[in-house]
Amino acid sequence: MRAAGQTLSNCSRSCSKALVRRRGHNAISEHHELPDMKESALEQFPDWDLLASWVAVVEAGSISDAAARLAISQAGVSHRIKVLEALLDTTLLDRATRPARPTAAGQRLFEHATVLLQGASQMVESVRSVTRAKRVIVRLGCVDSFAATMGPIVIRALSGTSHQIRLWSGIGPTLDAQLEARQVDIAVTTSGQPTVPGIIRQRLFSEPYFVVLPRNFEMDRYGTLTELARHLQLIRYSARSVIGQQVDGYLAANAETIERTYELDATDPLLSLVAAGLGFALTTPMCLWQSRQYLPEVRVLPLSAFSRLGRPYQTLSRSFYLAFRENELGRLPIEIYELLKLTFERQVSRDISKALSLKPEDIYTIDEA
């Protein structure tokens, strides 16, 4: 919510400055004058600074935290609340509680102000998009495995359009934070949970996890992964990544107690250790394709090849999502979504399945958005 509050605050500052200039004031200060009851009805509407300050107070939970978020003094925030209460002729904060809590009227104002400020932000972005230069720079962030395999395809496909694409890569949580902070415009991540209002997430496809072993490693029978770990160490993805969190959750759900030894952020070093015979890993077809130079030295098995009490392991999969802000960049997000989905289905999935000696339907499923 902090990133959203900052966005609303930034929007409110620009909008309220325009209103003050129209009214003939020279600048906006922390302290608004208490309203003159002889002013016109229009002058009695709260300006954007007042609304943004109230949203910040409710979201932050205290006047001091709201002041830090807005980069003004606590006295300035308190004064703005008093101005709002005078304008609306009501009490917004129950000051008898510690910390002070919004009254019913204050909560209603928060709900309306949030919608208004978000609408103002979208309005500004929409107007600016009409008058931007013909060649628009779009920052596309992708998780590492996706950037390595699909990134060049996107760049080539859009090279002749009016958009200039800058491709960034990283782990999912970092990309989600960058999208919320407007450091990237569009992101391909493996997180499908909405975190900030106004960000759309459309599912592209899902892929299963496989067990990857050194090529020359053999066992008479594949039982549990814990039994396998007695012969080979498990080489894990870092728990900071979504893929690492998914694997850890899967192992815990299947009562696997495997000692933590190697833990890596990237697929290249992870597979290099497997190829060297130092352990095994759980990873996905996209990751294997990203580091395909190691494929001749490893063997790929489905999770169902392992069993507990005579029952094969259940599958584990991860999904890719295209995330972008609603009502921004026109049709570009939809065009990129359709391009990625179609290209993966018709080209990339076939290349990967051929390299892994598997059928295309074994390495991905196309999900409904």
Image (cartoon, rainbow, N blue to C red):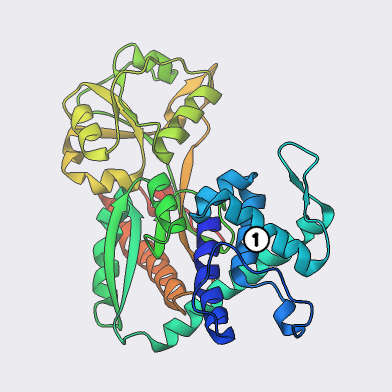
Estimate the x, y position of residue 236 in percent, counting from the top left: 34, 28
- In this picture, residue 64 sits left or right of residue 291: right
Q: Is residue 87 above or below residue 286?
A: below
Q: Is residue 369 above or below residue 246?
A: below
Q: Residues within 10 Å of mark 1 (few under 14, many from 20)?
A: many
Q: Is residue 341 above or below residue 107?
A: below
- Picture quadrant of residue 137: bottom left
Q: Is residue 264 above or below residue 117?
A: above
Q: Nearer the viewer, residue 299 or 134?
A: 134
Q: Which residue is mark 1?
A: 80
Q: Nearer the viewer, residue 340 or 136?
A: 136
Q: How many marks?
A: 1
Q: From this viewpoint, is residue 1 visible?
A: no
Amino acid marked by disc 1: Arg
Estimate the x, y position of residue 332 in percent, counting from the top left: 42, 76
Estimate the x, y position of residue 193 in percent, counting from the top left: 56, 49
Residue at image position (78%, 38%) is 97
Residue at image position (20%, 28%) is 273
Q: Nearer the viewer, residue 110 or 352?
A: 110
- Dividing the image into 4 quarters, which one contains the C terminus? bottom right
Q: Nearer the viewer, residue 282 or 330?
A: 330
- In this picture, residue 205 sits left or right of residue 354: right
Residue at image position (43%, 87%) is 130
Outermost residue toward the top? 230
Estimate the x, y position of residue 202 in percent, counting from the top left: 52, 61
Residue at image position (38%, 66%) is 340
- Picture quadrant of residue 152: bottom left
Q: From this viewpoint, is residue 195 visible?
A: yes
